Amino acid sequence: MRVLIVFAAALVLSALIFPAAIGQLARARMGQQIREEGPAAHHSKAGTPTAGGLLFVLVALVLYLAADRTLAGGFVLIALILGAALGFVDDVSAIRGRRSLGLKARHKIVIQLATGAFLGYLAVRWGLTSQWVPFDGRHPITGWIIIVVSALAVAVIAVLQQRPSAGLMPAILAGILVGFLFYNLYPARIFMGDTGSLALGTAMAAAAIATGFLWYLPLLALVFVVETISVIAQVASFKMTGRRVIKMSPLHNHFIVSGWRETPLALWFWAGSLVAAVLVLALARPGAPT
């Protein structure tokens, strides 16, 4: 019940405060920058308030203090804050520099690796090292290994078991995102920006650690993994052969320039995420610790 209550509270609270946030971000001239070579359909989105991920942190912090206060929840909250901080710097850099790219990719990766290593260290210090190993039950992971794995997981992703308290912060974030969706559906009134996407990616990795699903994270984040691989493949192919493997990366842009409308495309991506989540829950059935 606590999970359902905090989910509902996050949804209602975020839905109520996002209209005010949209106005504040607009007055602060935090408008989305659109890359010129992107899909033509995206150009109309230029200037839409971005960095809405700041509200993710605010709502999550309030509800954590009000309803959670566990080590696992605090671990995810710290990850959310660190990711949001990097994303906000990236968003401001893109807006002030009048370019859509923001910080250089190599700089973000280095910072994310350091963030992941720090989260791995906290996981060791706070005893969050017990993980579900595919087809082999639950096992503790040696400290230095989880630090390395955590760093890599956070760097790669820009999200039901016997400890329900570990699910409170993910439930809060899920509620916030549903509230955010009211204002992000096409045509969007606000974007989360890198402030939100990096915060959620970092928090997703932290939640996977806190709940013991770290080894299942690539499957749980299947859509994000496929999107990332599409960018890597596109860049590698163009540099080595001068040819593109898809019309435009990331993969969702390929479908947009191929004539897909954004709403049906988003529904297909949501369906893919849902299938991946169901597979993770089916494969990682909770059992007695080993």
Image (spheres, grey):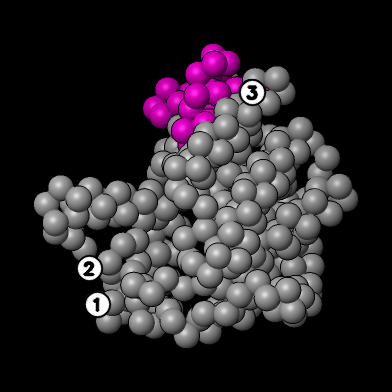
Dot 3 falls on a residue whose secondary structure is helix
- Which x, y percent locates residue 186? 51, 82
Say if residue 22 shows up in the picture. no
- Mark 1 or mark 3: which comes first in sequence? 3
Q: What residue would you read off at disc 2?
A: 247
Residue name at image x 73 percent, y 74 percent? 28
The label on residue 258 is 1
Residue that badge 3 annotates: 121
Mark 1 residue crowding within 10 angstroms, few (<14) / some (14–19) / many (20+)? few
Residue 174 image-quadrant placement: bottom right
Task: Measure how far apart labels 1 and 3 are at the Cα level.
Answer: 45 Å
Residue 149 shown in magenta: yes
Please provide percent x and percent y for residue 7: 72, 59
Determine whether 278 is above or below 177 in the image: above
- Magenta residues, start to end: 127-153
Helix or strand or loop: what does disc 1 sit on?
A: loop
The quarter in which the C terminus is drawn is top right
